[in-house]
Amino acid sequence: MNRVIIFANGDLPDLEKARALLHDDDFIIAADGGTRHALALGLTPNIIIGDMDSLPSTFNLQTFNGELLRFPADKNETDLELAIQHALTLNPEQVIILAALGGRLDQTLGNIALIISPIFIPHSSFLIRLDDGIEEVFFCDDHVQINGAAGDLVSLIPWQGEVTGVVTTNLKWHLQDETLYPHKTRGISNEMTGGTATVQIKSGLLLIVHQRIDKQGDSHF
């Protein structure tokens, strides 16, 4: 299996930009209320996972032909965490989580932390990403390539401590064997100078936020 797409129950600010992320052969998992986003895009989830307390009121479970994995409301995991756990049992090459950003800050922070859970590593190899078509969020523990366009914003945020040996290419403010500190904003709002950029580090863990900018040069936020 190449890719699993998980729809969370957060914000999805632009359906068409989200649609552009999808492939015809994607395996679709909806984390409970994330079902609404799949339906809005004309998709039927292969699996719906969760306690089913936030499904769209117009959705009829009786006519759903996919797999339903129901959990009790009183549980230790969010519906999204359960969805990621199940997705990894399918051995995909990549997991992309849509609608996990924006809305409640606690949920957003929790969702970001989820994708570097020791439970998911080394299974994920950091190929679990949060994306909504406008922003993508992922981690780097060695090196990564960022695919976008000139003018896109890229922020490099040290996670859990300092990050050493940071080297970048195709970013406007080039970093060459630098250290980024969690209490400093040195890596915020860099800018891509071409269609791809790279980031390499020697130690630590780097949170990368890539914000796609429209042709007018405006942020979507």
Image: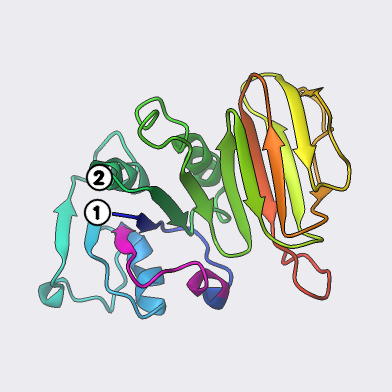
Closest to the observer: 74 or 160?
A: 160
Q: Is residue 59 above or below residue 102?
A: below
Q: Secondary structure at mark 2?
A: helix
Q: Residue at x 59, y 53 (%)?
A: 136
Mark 2 or 1, which is nearer the eye?
2
Quadrant housing the C terminus: bottom right
Q: Which mark is residue 86?
A: 2
Magenta residues (range): 17-31
Q: Is residue 124 above or below residue 83?
A: above
Whole-percent x, y for residue 183 in the image: 78, 24
Whole-percent x, y for residue 190 in the image: 82, 46
- The answer to whether residue 192 is left or right of residue 28 is right
**Residue 165 is covered by the magenta coloring:** no
Mark 2 and mark 1: Cα distance apart in space = 9 Å
Q: Are marks 2 and 1 in contact (CB under 8 Å)?
A: yes
Whole-percent x, y for residue 143 in the image: 62, 34
Residue 63 occupies which quadrant of the picture?
A: bottom left
The residue labelled by disc 1 is 49
